Image (cartoon, helix red, strand yellow):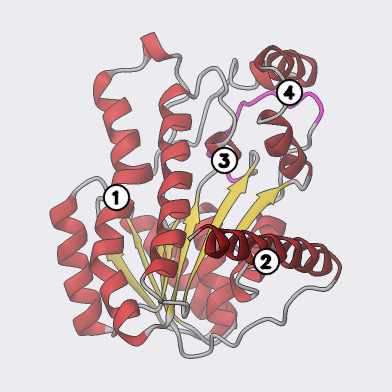
Amino acid sequence: MGIEIVFEGLWLLLKLIYYQIEAIFRFFVQPARKDVKGDIVLVTGAGSGIGQGMALEFAKLGCVVVGCDISNQGLEETRELLYERTGAKFHGYSCDLSNRDEIYKMADEIKKDVGKVTILINNAGIVTGKKLLDCPDALMQKTMEVNVIGHFWTLKAFLPDMLSSNHGHIVTIASAAGFFGVPGQVDYAASKFAAVGVSDALYQELDHLGKSGVKVTCVCPYYINTGMFDGVKIKMLPILDKDETVQKIVDAVLRNKYILMMPNVFYTFAALKNIVPTKSILAMSKFTGTIATMDEFVGRKKSS
């Protein structure tokens, strides 16, 4: 028994060394992009922002693009954009992602009308931008329902088909707020921390099930100029460009990248967070101005 543990420990050490070397190698040499032509891609929150951008990019790659959004106007804009830019048909479904029954109904319709989804992009999200005690209970609950609980229902609806064929990709659009708390984002950060946790646990669960053909990607960007965070004050780090962000997300999916943080400096921040004292993180937040970014938050104007 003791000898077996020693050999298992040595084997583990060798694997850890190998994985570290592999990670360094992949930092300089990216894996080839996979071919997704013909894949059925579902993008939640496809009516605006990076959801609309991802729908367009996957259409360019020859995917069958399905999108859902609570805004019919947004879905129509995405449909027109895809047809104008690519000539591709866009399959749009109106759905309130805080409503489990609507999600399951939509999933049945998609399977009947289009087919089995092979790439699921849980992108839809909302932000209140209010301090904890100023945020209405209903809005806090809605934030959790859309930003993370809805992921449970989309996964339960579409993951079984991926498991049966051992082919698919689950993409979680989380946020840098899934690693770092910011004043004015207590409910939002809670939902994004949870979304990161869902992605992380799902990654391990799929491996445990032996489903190596179903990939997982978790995306954690800083503020993006989509209008969702209009009014935020940026002191040092520049706000991310929507189109560039979309390109990086799609590239990460095509290369089966597990986690994507933007900008790259957040990889370092995330590592430091688990090493340096908590007060040091707070001091850095004050120095960079991150602690006050939401003080003048306005957010995206609602569309009908």
Asked whether 233 falls inside the magenta stretch, the response is yes
Q: Foreground residue, 235 or 217?
A: 217
Q: Nearer the viewer, mark 1 or mark 2?
A: 2
Q: Is residue 131 above or below residue 53?
A: above
The reply, left or right, for residue 26 in relation to residue 279 is: right
Q: Percent position (x, y) of residue 183?
A: 55, 17
Question: Identity of the amino acid at label 3?
Answer: Gly
Q: Of helix, strand and loop, which mostly describes the magenta segment?
A: loop
Q: Is residue 83 above or below residue 284?
A: below
Question: Identity of the amino acid at label 2?
Answer: Lys
Q: Is residue 201 above or below residue 184?
A: below
The reply, left or right, for residue 243 in relation to residue 218 is: right
Asked whether 196 falls inside the magenta stretch, the response is no
C-alpha gap between disc 3 and disc 1: 22 Å
Quadrant of the rendered structure where residue 159 is? bottom left
| Residue pointed to by mark 2 | 15
Q: Percent position (x, y) of residue 218?
A: 54, 55
The residue positioned 74% from the left and 16% from the top of the image is 280
Q: Secondary structure at mark 4?
A: loop
**Residue 276 — which label?**
4
Question: Identity of the amino acid at label 4?
Answer: Val
Q: Secondary structure at mark 2?
A: helix
| Residue pointed to by mark 1 | 150
- Name the N-terminal-most of marks 2 and 4: 2
Bounds of the magenta segment: 226-236
Q: Nearer the viewer, mark 3 or mark 2?
A: 2
